[in-house]
Amino acid sequence: MRHLPRFGSFLRCPNVLSLAPAFCSSSSSSAAAAATAAAVEIDGSFPIVENDARPACNYSDRSSSGLASHLVLRRLRSLERKPDRALAYFNRIEALGFHHDRSTYSAIVRILANSCRYEQLVTVFGKLISSGRDNAVEVLALLDALAPTLNDSPSLNCALDSMVISYTSYGTTVEAVDVFFQLISLGFASSPWCRSILIKSIAEDGNLVLMMEVYNRLRELGISLDSSVFLVVIKALSQGGKIDETLQILREMEESGLKPSPQVYSAIIKGLCTCGRYEAGYAILEETSRNGVDVDVLSYNRVIGCLSKDRRLHEAEDLLKKMIGRGVHPDVYSYKFLIQYYCETGNLIRALNFYDEMYNKGLRPDASIAGFIVLCYSKLGMDSEALAFFEKVKTSELYVDAVLYDIVLIAQCRLGRMMDAAETFQEMKNKGFIPDKIHYTNLLNGYCRKGEMYNAQKVFADMVKSDVEPDLLTYNALAGGFCRNGFVNEAFKLLDYMLNRGFEPNALTYSVAIDGLCRAGKLKEAEMLFEILEQKKISQCTIIFSAMICGYLESGCTIKAFGLFVRLQKQGSIVDDIARSRLINQLCRQGDIERASSVFKLIQERQIVPNEVCYNNLIAAYCQVGDICNARLLFDDYVNRGFSPDVILYTSMISGYCKTNHFQEAHELFCQMIESDIKLDVIAYTAILDCHLKENLHKARLGHNKEKLKTRAWEIFCKLANSMKAMEVQPDTVCYTVLINWHCKMDYLEDARKLIDEMFGNGLALDAFAYNALLSGYCNRGDIETAKNLVEEMQSRKIQLTKLTFSILAEKLKIWQT
C-alpha cells in the first residue's frame, strides 16, 4: 500500500483549506486558571505546572485550563505504550477546559492507531466531526500530518478505517462516501471491514441509489469485494424489493469466484417471498439444497408461509417433509402457517394433525396457534368442541392471551352458556388481562341473545364504570337486545344516552331499532321511525331500507314490502341481498310469481346480478306452477353468469320438466348432474324415479306396449336402486312412497308390500299415501280380502284413513259388486 502524500502535497487538493485558524487557540492566562492547573495532578503521577522550563512559543499555546500544548504532548508521549491511560488523560484534561489542537489530536490518534484501538479512534474522530468545525478538512489534514509517523501499514489502516467509520456514526453517509473516495484517490487501500461498514451504513439509511453508486465505483476501480460486502448489498436490495438487481449482484458475486453463503441465499429468498415472487424463492431453495448448501429454517418457513397463504397447502406440506428429511429442524412457525391456513379453509382435521405433530416434536404452540384452532371449531359450528380444546390448552399450561379468551367468550355466548362466559370473563381479569370494549361487547351481546337484559345492562354499567368507552357496536348490540326482547322504550332511552355521550346513532343503530320494533309487533312505530328518518334525509342508506323491507316481511305484510321496494327502486335507492332474497322467497311461497318476477327484473335493470338464492327461489317457483319455459331461461342465465347449479336446483328443474311431461329434458339434466360430479341426495333420486314412472304411464296411455314398458321400467329401477346403494343414499318416507306407487303401477304388488314392511322396520313414519297405492293395486286385481286386511292393518298402526282411502274402497267395491 502506498503511504499518503506529505502534508504539503495534500494541501494542494482543491477540498483542503488552511488549518492554522482551526487548530490555534488563544486565551489570556489568569491567576485563577494557573492556580487551578497547578493544583491538579493528572493521571496520579505527573503534575502539570505552569512554570515549566520550556521556552515560550511565538503563539499562545495555553488553554483556559492554564495547561500548555507542549506539556500535554510531553505527557502523551510518556504514555505511548499505555493507550488506555493516554486516552483517559486526553479526555480528563479536556473536561477541565483544555482545548486540544492538531498536535494533541495527532498524538492520541498515533497512540491509539499503533495499538489498533478501533473503537476509541472512532470516538476521537467523532469529537472532531461533531464539533461544528469544517470537519472534512480538519480530519483529512490531521491524517495527512500523521501519515509520516504511522509507518506501520496496520496502524495507518486502523486510523484511516476508523476515520471513515466515524463519519457513518457522527456525520452523514454522504460525507463518509466523499471522504472515503478522497482517500482512495490518494492511494488509501481500504480494508474489507471498512468497505463493509460503509456500505452497510448507507443501506441502513435506505439510500439504495447511493449504495449502488459506491458498489459500482468500487468495481470500476478494480477493488476486490469480499463476501460481507456482497451480503450487505444483496440484503438491502432484497428488502427494498429490487429482485432483478439482487439476482444480478448474485451473478457478479459468483463471477468474482466467491461462493454465496447460506445467509446470501436466505436474504434473496426473503426478498422474493416479500415481493410475491415466492415461486422463484422456492426454486432457489431447491437448487441450493441440491448443491449441498445448508439453508436455514427461516428460509423454509418463508416459502411454506407463502405457499400456505396462496392455499397451496399440499405443496407446503411436501416442503415441510423435505426440510425435515434434509436435517433442518422445524420450529413453531414451520407448523404455524399450515395450521393457520388449514383452519381458514375449514380443514380442521389436517390442522389438528399438524398441531399434534408439532407437540410430539417438543415444540410448544403459542396462543395464536391455539386461537386458530378454537376459531376454526367455532366457524364450523362446533362450539362445544372449541371449548373442550380450550380446556385442554389450559391444562397444558400454554399461555392464553386476550384474543383467545375473546374467541372462547364468543363460543360460550353462542351456546348460551352465559354462566361459563361470565366465569371466563372473570378468570381473564384475575390473570391480569384488562378487558377491552371487544370483550365487554361480546359478553353483553351473549346476554342479549339469550334475553337476559338485566345482566346485559350490568355488563354495560361495569364497562362504563371501568372507563372502557362503549362504541357503536356496543350500543347497537344492546339496542338490538332491547328491541328483540320487547323493551322498546329502553332502546330509545339508550339512543338518548348515546347522544348525551356524544355518539351519533348510525344507520346500523336505526336499522336495529326498526328490526326490533317489527319483531315486537310494533309495525306502526317502526313505520313512524322510518318516515322520520326519510324526512331528515337520514334514511338514504341501504341498511335502513333493507331493515324496513325485512320488517314488513317479518310482520307478514308482503305487499307493503313489495310496494316499498318498487318505490325505492324508482327513487334510485337499493336494498341489500338479504332483503331482495327474502322478498322474492316470500312472494314465491305465496304463489305470487308475477310480483316475484317483477322484483327480479327490477334488480337486473339496476345492473345488479341477483344472488344464487334469488335465482333458486324463482326457478323453483316457476317449476312449481309448471312454467318450465321461464324456469329454463332463468336456469341458463344462471349458468351463463358463472354460477354452478347445485343438487337442489337440478332437482327443481327435473321436477318441473316431469310435471309438464318433458321427460327427455329431465333425463338430460339428470345425466348432466352426474357428469358434473354433483353428489346426489335422496330428493334427487326420488325426483328421477317419479319422472320415469310418469313417463311410463304417459306412454302407456298413448298405446305403447305395456310389457315392454314394464321390462324397461324394471331395468331403470334396478339401475337407480343400485346407484343409491353405491352412493349410500337411504330412502326417506317420500322416496319409499314413490317407490311403492311405482311398483303398484307396474303391478309388482308383492314387492310393494315388502317396501312397506321395510319402511316400518327402518322406523320411518308410515302414512296413508303409501298404503293407498297398494290398496288401489289389490282392488284392481280384485283381491278384496287382502284390501280389507290392509285397511285393518292401517287402523292397527293408527294410520288415519283419508278421503282417498275411502274413495278407492267405495269405487272398487262398487265395481266388483256390479
Image: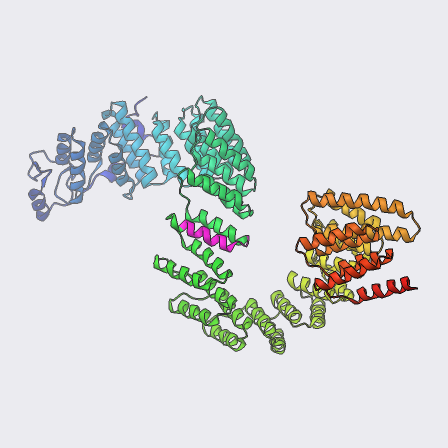
- Work out whether residue 638 can be spotted: no
- Work out whether residue 509 can be spotted: yes
In the image, is 263 to the left or to the right of 737?
left
Q: Is residue 703 above or below residue 326?
A: below
In the image, is 39 to the left or to the right of 763?
left
Report the residue at 86% width, 55% height from top.
Answer: 781
Coloring basis for residues: rainbow
Q: Is residue 383 magenta?
A: yes
Q: Position of residue 25 (x, y in %)?
A: 20, 41
Report the residue at 37% width, 48% height from top.
Answer: 397
* Residue that lies at the very extreme toward the front in this rendered image: 785
- Taking depth in this image into account, of 252 and 777 the one nearest to the observer is 777
- Taking depth in this image into account, of 512 and 648 the one nearest to the observer is 648
Which quadrant of the figure has residue 801? bottom right
Q: Position of residue 660 (x, y in %)?
A: 84, 56
Q: Position of residue 7 (x, y in %)?
A: 27, 28
Q: Is residue 170 above or below residue 805?
A: above
Report the residue at 36% width, 60% height from top.
Answer: 429
- Taking depth in this image into account, of 115 and 314 the one nearest to the observer is 314
- Taking depth in this image into account, of 659 and 22 the one nearest to the observer is 659
In the image, is 514 to the left or to the right of 448?
right
How many numbered circles are shown?
Answer: 0
Report the residue at 61% width, 73% height from top.
Answer: 518
**Quarter containing the N terminus:** top left
**Quarter containing the C terminus:** bottom right
In the image, is 245 to the left or to the right of 594?
left
Stretch in magenta? 380-393
Q: Is residue 434 magenta?
A: no
